[in-house]
Image: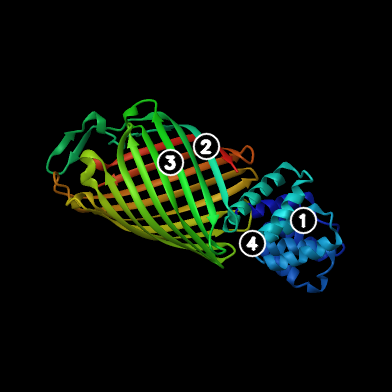
Amino acid sequence: MSSLRTLAACVLLLGLAPDLHAAPVDDIKSLVEQGKAADAYQLGAKHSELLGQPDFDLAFGVAAIDSGHGGEGVLALERYIVNVPDNMNARLELARGYFSLGEDIRAREEFERVMQTRPPAPVQANIDRFLDAIRSRQSRYVTTAGFYVEAGYGYDSNVNGGVGNATVNLPLFGAVIVDQSGVKAGSSYNWLAAGGQVSKPIITPGLSIFAVGQMDGKYNNANNQFDQNNVTAAGGFTFLQNKNFYRLTFLHNEIAVDDTRFRDIDSVSGEWQRQIDERQTVSPFVLYAQLRYVGDNRLRDADLYAGGISYRRSFVGNWQPLLTASINGGQEHNNQGRPDLGRQVYGGRVALAITPAPKWGVSMGASYLHSHYSGPDLLLDETRKDNYYAVDAAVSYAVTRNLSARVELLVSNNGSNIDLYAYRRDIAIIKLRYEFK
């Protein structure tokens, strides 16, 4: 949970208990405030003779939880609460400890008890994040559901994915002029989306069935022949066992361009998430998809076989950095006898998310995808090879627990050995999202 460190900082700003053993306790508190929770924990562990002293238990409990030693932290804070039951700051830390140990019911009770005292707005914002995370995790035990609506306004510099210049050099033909419909065209656009999900435990604890649906539309204010509508429905099963989480997903997607059906995707995927420790997760996956086009584009029909692995790590420290990285590869096999429309792909992505303030989130990432087509272009007699690069960034702000605002930016470039397929595309958008929780 990326907001763990933020909540700790908020609590420390409220002040810890009065000092009875000033030297070690002050040093532990100072190290935690500096984002050096591991050092604070090690220092506290050297003074085990002070365990049971309220001020020491509180300081050591905070350091233990922040450094990934949730069990020890909870024990220390429980001892403190017995002696000082009305200290809401300590109860807040205890709730955070329960959360880190997966004790969701006890964590919720403590968080809600603190919320009843009307703590400062930054603390309330972080408690809301924990309660949302608890609600998500409790889908293992109880039926949960959610729904959202979203609206936005943005600008797309290349709505048709066209070349930057009408004159391109092509193999065999040399310099040619591309039809205007294939030349880069920009437009502002409106964005609308709605979706929802439901999860229900079945048969045995840890096993659930889920369903997800989403509809979205991108409506250009110019060049609206490239308007797009997406409809996605997915469902499947999840199973949680100790540190292993498994997901099997069946998905159907339809995309329409200018209100005309363009392509359908039916897929099945499997994912295994393995929790290495409290801060690290690794997730391999496999996927099979059928890509089916409409009309003249049926020549592009293909079967996609893909797989990959992702890694996720959270860090203790200011702004609670969360790092994700992934690699993937696959084969898109054309089943219409057109190897020039099939390809082998491989790529990767790295992203970093931070929380600079309780209601703010910032993320940035970079992606790469290489495509090597399976046969020479029938007209140009050259095998196409593409390299796609993109960087993206987003800033979000939680107006309330349900309403959020988000600004997104994407800068991308597709390089190709055949100029006809090379293009640059930049997209910026601001969105408002309301979630019914």
Quarter placement of the C terminus? top right
Against 258, residue 409 (above or below) is: below
Its colouring scheme is rainbow
The mark nearer the N terminus, 4 or 1, is 1
List x then y, in percent, for residue 36: 67, 60
Against 171, residue 32 (above or below) is: below
**How many numbered circles are shown?**
4
- CA distance for labels 2 and 4: 30 Å
Res. 102 mark: 4
Judge from the rendering whether residue 362 lies leftward or rightward of residue 416; answer left or right: right
Residue matched to label 2:
149
Residue matched to label 3:
410
The answer to whether the residues at label 3 and label 2 have Cβ atoms under 8 Å apart is no
Residue matched to label 1:
91
Front-most of residues 324 and 131: 131
The mark nearer the N terminus, 2 or 4, is 4
Foreground label between 4 and 3: 4
Foreground label between 3 and 2: 2
Looking at the image, can residue 13 be seen?
no
- CA distance for labels 2 and 1: 35 Å
